Amino acid sequence: MPVRTRPKPRIGLDEWTSGYAPLPGIPDEFLGADGNPHPTWRRFLRALGEIPPAELGRRFASADRHIRDAGVSYRAYGEETERAWPLSHLPLLLGEAEWAAIAAGIEQRARLLEAVLADVYGEGRLVRDGHLPAAALAGSADFLRPMAGLKPPGGRWLHLYAADLGRGPDGRWWVLGDRTQAPSGAGYALENRLVLSRAFPDLYARLNVERLAPFFAAFREGLAACAVRATPRIGLLTPGPYSQTYFEQAYLARYLGLLLVEGDDLVARDRRVDVRTVSGLKRVDVLWRRIDGDFADPLELNAASRLGVPGLLEAMRRNVVVVANAPGSGVIESRSLLGFLPVLCRQLLGEDLRLPNIATWWCGEPGARKAAAARLRELAFEPAYRAAGSGPSGNGGLLGPELDRAGRARLAGLLEARGIDWVAQEIVRLSTTPVWEGGALVPRPFTLRVFAAATPDGWRVMPGGFCRIAEEPDARAVAMAEGTRSADVWVLSERPVAPVSLLPSADQVQVRRIPGHLPSRAADNLFWLGRYLERAEALLRVVRALCSRLPERGPASFDASPAAETLRALLVEWKAAAETVETRAEAALGAIRGAERPGSVLSAVLSAQRAAAGLRERLSPDAWHLIRRLRALVEGGAAGRDAGLTDPDIVELVEAALGLLAAFAGLSHENMNRAAGWRFLEMGRRTERGVNTCRLARALAGAGPVAGNLDTLLDLVDCQITYHSRYLVGLTPSPVKDLVVLDPYNPRSVAFQVGALADHLANLPPIREDGLMEMPRRLVMALEADLARQEAEAIGAPVLLDVERRLMDLAEAIGTCYFPHGPHAARAENLFALA
Amino acid sequence: MIYDVAHVTTYRYEEQVASATCTLRLTPMRTADQAVLSSAIEVHPPPASRRTRSGFFGARTDEIRIDTPHRELRIEARSRVEVQTVRQPSLLAEPAWEEVRDAAARSDSLAPSAPVHHLFPSPFVAFSDPMTRYAAKSFPAGAGVVEGALALMRRIKADFVYDPRATQVTTLPFQAFERRRGVCQDFAHIMIAGLRGLGLPAAYVSGYIRTTPIGGTRLQGSDATHAWVSLWCGPDIGWIGLDPTNGIRAGDDHIQLALGRDYADVAPVTGIILGSGAQRLTVAVDVIPLGAAPVDG
């Protein structure tokens, strides 16, 4: 970076801020009540002002690009596709002193809530002595009765705690809500930090921004310290790729070095909890739970859950696995409890609550209900709990000021009938922070989620957080559930901060080369990722042959050339082309882009992307990015734009796609560790290539020799040059078949694929304990031997069909041996006929 | 009255099932009104492991694991139960239903017998305005809680058609309410939803009902498990059993298996099997008063 010798002071500052007008009566993070910038923002804007406007624009754009390319995403509830994560270009700034007060408040609150949970599920003193009404707890769907009396292993309920904060009109920070179920957002905070610190490395260093990495290291150490074993295996228990925050879970699993597991991957029995891996069952000591507590164990909790682990609660009772946070912790999120916390804090900790709650009254108490009913016009009314059950009863919140006379009467009736379901809350308008919009700063309300992790030395608070910004300038705290934009949060230290990353000091780490056991699910996904990508490649090659080999014929329809007819028949057989007669361009484009055709390139790529989505913590961002680009390319633009495409255009498209596939192959070849994961990816690829080559050879060289067919076959398997350098004569069947099927030195021959499969299988860790050979290995060795003594002359359709079937059997055997618990689990539930 | 109960559950699978883990709630509860003289559960194929614990609401739960591949799972529960219902003297002044509602909300107990567990929506019992309004007709201001509950129970018996084909085990109460038909599970859920909608704590009870009452008409629900409602009527009266399917108070004809917030808490068999393909379930229940000649089931 060039050294700036002549800093241009505050060039843009006035320009950006001249029109900045905080909302009347609402505190603003940037401008004080006196109209002067707060010192933190002055520091920040002064530094930012030194960056020339054009450069600034470039940096903002690079931040946006990073978010897109890295696939930072979330899924809105009910959506199938992921959305990009919108990140504000400016951080939320907090000064050191202000932060210290927040952190102390969060630390106290975490201690308090842990004590409340321990009492509620344990002794029950708070309820018995009248400090907490029983109904205020029992209404929550997260009050899990089977947890009563259970002492959670690791000695605590909460391991990660988060609170949503807002700054009220009085300038103080208020707690809007507690997150104890399975707080999300820490990973997005980390990713936001990564993006912004890359876009503004100089600012980041100069302003002494507190680092996040030590917090995550402490969190991981805290989890490890709870385990019984000294070097525990820690898993992140995810609901799977369709969860809203799956990206975040995969990201954190990767960052923290945790095993990303779904319920089906785990087995709880015989005083152990194990993960299914390609080397058999391996013990798991700690599970960081990201599924809802009620779903954690279908045997004792919600029997309809497919996300949990049967027997998990019993494993907790036997103290063999730590679950963080313990199931049942979510009860703390009930709004009904907020109003009682000041009293509970004095009761349990002997301290005053440092951070106030947003003023909340549980309407199950007659006094509170009466007071709230008298202020219907001023207060907000919210459900007191996350409710159970389904049906037409879901009640959302109601804002008193927005109700008409009939609405108020209805609300009064609801409170009278079942006040226990409601809380009344003071309406607080949130403070605003500057957001960059259209070249200027504008004020927008925000909430701040702050995280605390339990460590052996007490609670540790992340210096920063996850800031969500509302789109509308005027937001009331209770009305703002989900912001649509997020911002990084910078805590500015007065002193330089030590640059830390998650790398521990050298003497803490023992050198090891085996990266742990590969979970069966990951192996399954890798295997299929390899297969689908290879399938896409084979299809693309056929399409290319179809469009480039026959230029002399008319473009309008299929000609009578045997090779073209064979290729079309192949595409139909693979369900990539329609059986009805199409023009060549139609057939080719349909085979590439036909979303409704199960055998199209697009279908293969989408399947590959799904497999990859289940592997987000294992794939490098580059690999994920390549798959996304491949999908975009194959999908094409808007419908109708393909109408005028000619053969050369299609060939160009095919070659671009093949280029991306080659890049992926190169990436996995050069960058992936030669551990079990790589072997499964490769085995998928080899199996698919072997099968496809058999099919191509059967179609083009299976029967008697047909002019043009052998030539096309050599094209499809990429062997023209090899053939012609080896044989001076023209194409004859036996040499071609030898090269395509039997030649063990040709990386595209069937024999080569089988040899590679044999090699991979020989190098996988043994599962059987009796020392006998696993089934896949037996199959592959027999096939390899048969191919070795096969003669080219004897190869015809029957032999090729036999080899193809044996390869399919091998794939089946690999699945049964290494990932038998895939999608086959069914359940016996809810079938009981009552009368 | 002493009963012998046989409850046989059979799952037949289209494809072989590799393993099964099940939760069984098939042992009658011990309560003030009910003594369990003996009970046994036999499972075929024999489980590799078996664990017994007590559920939150006091029902005995057996967890079994079967590792033997099988196409049929057969669970036979047999028990001998003595039922002797102790009724409060009816002269006891009953509280107004509003008093009961307010007492439940103020309750300072989370014990399994506390009313607060049965005040709120639960997985199978969501509220709906029509159900709450329906129930409210039996509870005019100041009405006695037992009086109101009995009236509601009788109205359900009168207004709804017993029809095993109208609903399934997964039918939600508001759906059965709209159809005005269903089975004991639906009627119990509807009554619970109505009572809770008014703020009254109502629990779901699963069990059996005697097949051939002496001198009475045959009762509905005797060929399978039965379900009824338990209502908390304030600290003095406590819980009373109400059977909306038959329009009677639960008494010596009712044998209690389990109690919970709704069907989900008491389902006799739940679990997970590892296998694919369809499954077929048959249930056979026989409730024989001791000394009576066995009746063909």
Image (spheres, rainbow, N blue to C red):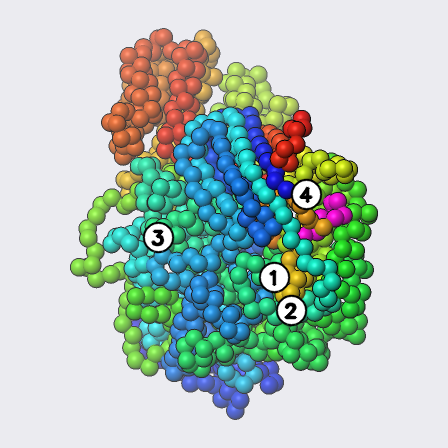
Which of labels 3 and 2 is toward the front?
2
Which of labels 1 and 3 is toward the front?
1
Which of labels 1 and 4 is toward the front?
4
**Amino acid identity at mark 1:** Pro
Badge 3 element: loop
Q: Is residue B191 magenta?
A: no
Q: Is residue A52 above or below residue A81?
A: below
Identify residue for label 4.
Answer: B253
Q: Does residue A135 appear in this view?
A: yes
Q: Is residue A101 above or below residue A227?
A: below
Span highlighted in magenta in the image? B241-248
- The chain containing the residue under callout 1 comes to B
Badge 4 element: loop
Q: Tell me whether marks 1 and 4 sit on the same chain.
A: yes
| Residue visible at 55% across and 27% down in the picture | B13
User: Of label 4 and label 2, which has the lower sequence position?
Assistant: 2
Cβ atoms under marks 3 and 4 closer than 8 Å:
no
Which of labels 3 and 4 is toward the front?
4
Q: Residues within 10 Å of mark 4 (few under 14, many from 20)?
A: many
Mark identifier at residue B115: 1
